Amino acid sequence: MNDSKRSITLYGIPNCDTVKKARNWLDARALAHTFHNFKKDGVTPSLIEAWLRDNDWEALINRKGTTWRALDDARKAGVVDAPSAIALMCEAPSVIKRPVLTIGNAAAQHVNVGFSEAHYQQIFQK
C-alpha cells in the first residue's frame, strides 16, 4: 500500500494505552497521520456509518470497557442493531473500541478497529 498518497487518520482518546501504542507504532515508521480525539472532536452518525462499511457494528462496541460496564442494563439491552449502536456511540464515544484507523478517502477507505502490531504491519506492507 503506498501510504504517501493516502490519508491516514487514527481515532481514539489520547489517554488510552492501546491508542498510545498505535500512535507510537505509526510515529516510529514515520507514517504521517491525523489524530481525531473522540472526546474533544466528537463523532457523527455519518462517520460511524462509514466505518460500518468495513466492520460489523458489534466490532465497534467495546463491551469490556468501563463506559459500557457503567451503562444500566436497559441501555445495554437496547443496543441491538446498527442504528441503536450508532446512537450510543454518538452519545458516549468512549464506548467505541479503540483505536479506529482509516486509510484513504471517503470513496475508497480501509477501516481497522483495534491495534495489533502484526496486523498494522500487514496493513502497511509496501
Image (cartoon, rainbow, N blue to C red):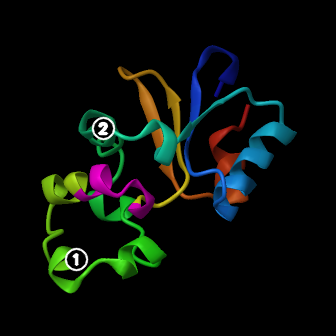
2 or 1: tag closer to the N-terminus: 2
Gap between marks 2 and 1, in whole Å?
A: 20 Å
* Amino acid identity at mark 1: Lys
Q: Which residue is mark 1?
A: 76
Seen in the picture, residue 60 relative to 122 is either above or below; the reply is below
**Residue with the most extreme right position:** 28
Q: Residues within 10 Å of mark 2 (few under 14, many from 20)?
A: some
What is the quadrant of residue 103 in the picture? Answer: top right
Total numbered badges shown on the rendered structure? 2
> Which image quarter holds the C terminus?
top right
> Which image quarter holds the N terminus?
top right
The residue drawn where x is 13% and y is 72% is: 78
* Label placed on residue 44: 2
Question: Is residue 79 one of those drawn in magenta?
Answer: no
Q: Secondary structure at mark 2?
A: loop
Q: Position of residue 97 (x, y in %)?
A: 46, 61
Q: Secondary structure at mark 1?
A: helix
**Does the magenta stretch mainly form a helix, a strand or a loop?**
helix
Q: Specify start and end residues of the magenta stretch as a single range.
A: 88-95
**Residue with the most extreme front position:** 40
- Front one among 18 and 74: 74
